[in-house]
Image (cartoon, helix red, strand yellow):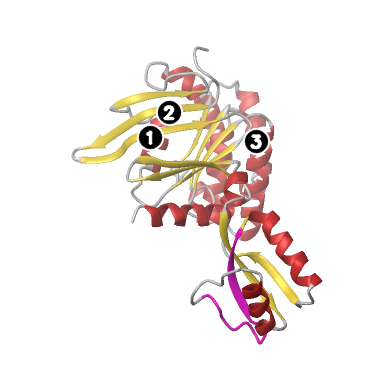
């Protein structure tokens, strides 16, 4: 390989007529890690994923996936890439098993190996009972699970997942998180796009934020968690809590105080988990009856909102 493993994208541009869907994206996703692709609608996430999957040719920039250029080395790149689009599309008359064995045949897996792989993946995504049912009878969430299985048929090195949690019930969302983390632990590169940022908090190691077709920021989830963000604190004596916070130099955000079943709650901006732990220890030591303390929002959600605020 002439390029590092994982995903490397530099200066990528792709326009549709006068619309610049991707307008200078830089992105690195490393093996063994889950990278979240975050941005509002129209920020270029799906277009970028299509470029990485080899389904769109970029107008400019360089891309390598698992060390291969999807344009000039398409066969090698696709052989190592698993692509899960946001909408499951397949031959609805085929059974779930036939969908997977057909894809296995397309990747040149021997018939017996393809059948065994299909059975293994149907078990993994909990669709055993629908193995011989036509795909059109599946619910939206079940089709998403079949889409993940389809992306994994050829055991790719790189996974591109576009809104994989869409339509999933709570149990399936938990399963998805576990499956994605397991794939990363096997050394695979996982790039996942989702609007459900609280889900990404529990899955991702890194995050790339897009805005108007460009890379707005890159963060590790650990670094984002250490940044200043609001924490919600509740107390059995809200007046004492507010007085104590004021006496200790903490400013309650304007308009952030709300009733909470008689307990009361305030929002205070703190510099990560360590600062929250120190505040809790000090408050309890001073006799303030704290009943709960927790971030007011998800780590990536807060980082995203701050970036959006900066661009206004």
- Region in magenta: 256-270
Tell me how far mark 3 sits from mark 1, CA to CA: 26 Å
Of all residues shown, which one is farthest toward the top? 2
Of residues 212 and 75, the one nearer the viewer is 212
Q: Residue 257 colored magenta? A: yes
Screen quadrant of the C terminus: bottom left
The residue singled out by tag 1 in the image is 25
Tell me how far mark 2 sits from mark 3, CA to CA: 22 Å
Determine whether label 1 and label 2 are within 8 Å by CB.
Answer: yes
Q: Residues within 10 Å of mark 3 (few under 14, many from 20)?
A: many
- The kind of secondary structure element at disc 2 is strand
The residue singled out by tag 3 in the image is 183
* Residue 119 can be seen in this image: no
Q: Residue 165 colored magenta? A: no
The residue singled out by tag 2 in the image is 9
Image position of 138 with respect to 14: above or below? below
Q: Position of residue 36 (x, y in %)?
A: 52, 43
Q: Is residue 71 left or right of residue 117?
A: left
Q: For the stretch drawn in magenta, what is the main secondary structure?
A: loop
């Amino acid at each position: 390989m002439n390029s590092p493993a994982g995903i490397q994208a530099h200066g990528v541009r792709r326009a549709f007529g006068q619309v610049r869907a991707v307008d200078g994206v830089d992105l690195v996703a490393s093996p063994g890690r889950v990278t979240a692709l975050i941005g509002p609608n129209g920020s270029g996430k799906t277009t970028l994923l299509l470029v990485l999957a080899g389904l769109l040719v970029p107008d400019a920039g360089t891309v390598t996936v698992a060390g291969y250029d999807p344009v000039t080395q398409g066969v090698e790149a696709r052989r190592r890439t698993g692509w899960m689009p946001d909408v499951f599309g397949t031959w609805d008359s085929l059974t779930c098993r036939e969908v997977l064995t057909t894809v296995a045949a397309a990747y040149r897996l021997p018939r017996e190996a393809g059948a065994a792989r299909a059975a293994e993946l149907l078990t993994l995504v909990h669709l055993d009972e629908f193995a011989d049912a036509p795909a059109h009878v599946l619910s939206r969430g079940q089709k998403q699970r079949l889409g993940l299985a389809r992306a994994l048929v050829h055991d790719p090195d790189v996974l591109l997942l576009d809104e994989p949690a869409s339509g999933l019930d709570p149990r399936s969302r938990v399963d998805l998180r576990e499956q994605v983390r397991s794939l990363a632990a096997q050394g695979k590169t996982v790039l996942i796009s989702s609007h459900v940022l609280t889900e990404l908090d529990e899955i991702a190691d890194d995050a790339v934020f897009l805005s108007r077709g460009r890379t707005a920021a890159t963060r590790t989830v650990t670094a984002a968690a250490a940044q200043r963000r609001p924490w919600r604190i509740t107390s059995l004596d809200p007046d004492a809590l507010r007085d104590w916070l004021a006496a200790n130099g903490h400013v309650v955000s304007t308009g952030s105080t709300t009733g909470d079943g008689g307990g009361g709650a305030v929002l205070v901006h703190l510099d990560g988990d360590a600062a929250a732990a120190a505040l809790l220890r000090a408050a309890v030591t001073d006799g303030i009856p704290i009943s709960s303390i927790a971030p007011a929002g998800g780590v990536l959600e807060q980082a995203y909102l701050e970036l959006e605020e900066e661009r206004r």
